[in-house]
Amino acid sequence: MWNIPLTSRVGNGYVYSSQFCSPEEAETELRQHLNVSDETPARHLTMPVGRLQKHWHNNCVAIGLAQGFIEPLEATALMLVQYGIYQLSSRLGEPVTTISRSQYNKEMKRMFDGIRDYIVAHYYLNTRTDTPYWQACRHDIRVPANLSLLVNAWDGPGEFEEALDSIDEQLVYLTPSWYCILAGMGRFKSDAVNLPDPDTAAGIQQYLTSTVAKHFRGRLYPLS
Ligand SMILES: Cc1cc2nc3c(=O)[nH]c(=O)nc-3n(C[C@H](O)[C@H](O)[C@H](O)COP(=O)(O)OP(=O)(O)OC[C@H]3O[C@@H](n4cnc5c(N)ncnc54)[C@H](O)[C@@H]3O)c2cc1C
């Protein structure tokens, strides 16, 4: 559910999957949550999710909802609008060619797909067991290839940093964001959190040094 103050009113909404909840159930739940009667009107909207194959075709460029839509809660739409305008305007100073259109389309697709990977991670990595919806997100969704690669590297014995490097050019959310989402969702192997005795400075120093050596090899200056 979302709640957004606008200039003249407060907007409230409930995003749900029609596979798990009917429009009537969603409306009833939202009304109860907001404590509003049936007299307050509710609008039901459907979301076609996806992106265009070609954002720029001949002399027509799709920007905003016309170019695609990923998900309402992470709120990446305006960034995509701005990015599309920036990418377009930076190509308009020179004669438009098939190559410039194709580069634009490639870049917008990379942006959409990279954002999709990170957003899907929120759903796929959830640990909720309270509803069939959240369980289906964990077990039944099609996991994008890059997300699958990163989660396997995180879970397995391989180097997570190497996995990130291997898809560096496709990443939209950079390294810190991936650590945040994976750790923030509590995805740790049972033996992964081997914290030192917090009472000894030497133990903490040793833990930090070994962690930096393991995860940021050659990227940071050694701790002194
Ligand atoms: C409450 C709310 C909060 C949001 N918060 C965020 C956020 O925090 N971050 C984020 O990234 N995104 C957010 N979004 C999503 C974002 O606002 C939209 O994705 C974005 O505005 C879409 O831009 P657009 O130009 O494609 O469409 P719109 O902004 O809907 O613009 C379409 C325009 O076309 C006009 N129009 C429609 N039909 C006609 C017609 N026949 N003739 C002439 N004009 C017409 C409309 O009046 C409108 O001005 C939010 C959306 C809502 C509703």
Image (cartoon, helix red, strand yellow):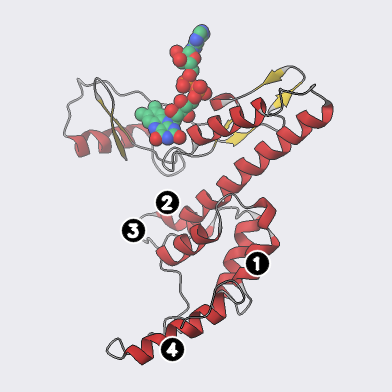
User: What type is the residue that disc 2 sits on?
Assistant: Tyr
- The numbered dot on residue 184 is none
Looking at marks 1 and 3 on the same chain, the residue that comes earlier in the sequence is marked by: 3
Within 10 angstroms of label 2, few (less than 14), some, or many (20 or more) residues? Answer: some
Residue drawn at x 51%, y 36% is 79
Looking at marks 3 and 4 on the same chain, the residue that comes earlier in the sequence is marked by: 3
Q: Return the residue at label 1.
A: 163
Within 10 angstroms of label 1, few (less than 14), some, or many (20 or more) residues? Answer: some
**Secondary structure found at label 2:** helix
Q: Return the residue at label 3.
A: 130
Question: Closest to the observer: 195 or 47?
Answer: 195
Q: Return the residue at label 4.
A: 206
Looking at marks 1 and 4 on the same chain, the residue that comes earlier in the sequence is marked by: 1
Q: What is the CA distance from the residue labelled 2 to the residue labelled 4? A: 43 Å
Q: Return the residue at label 2.
A: 133
Within 10 angstroms of label 4, few (less than 14), some, or many (20 or more) residues? Answer: few
**Secondary structure found at label 3:** loop
User: What type is the residue that disc 3 sits on?
Assistant: Asp
Percent position (x, y) of residue 71? 48, 39
On screen, residue 185 above or below 6: below
Q: What is the CA distance from the residue labelled 2 to the residue labelled 3? A: 9 Å
Horizontally, residue 38 falls left or right of residue 200, namely: left
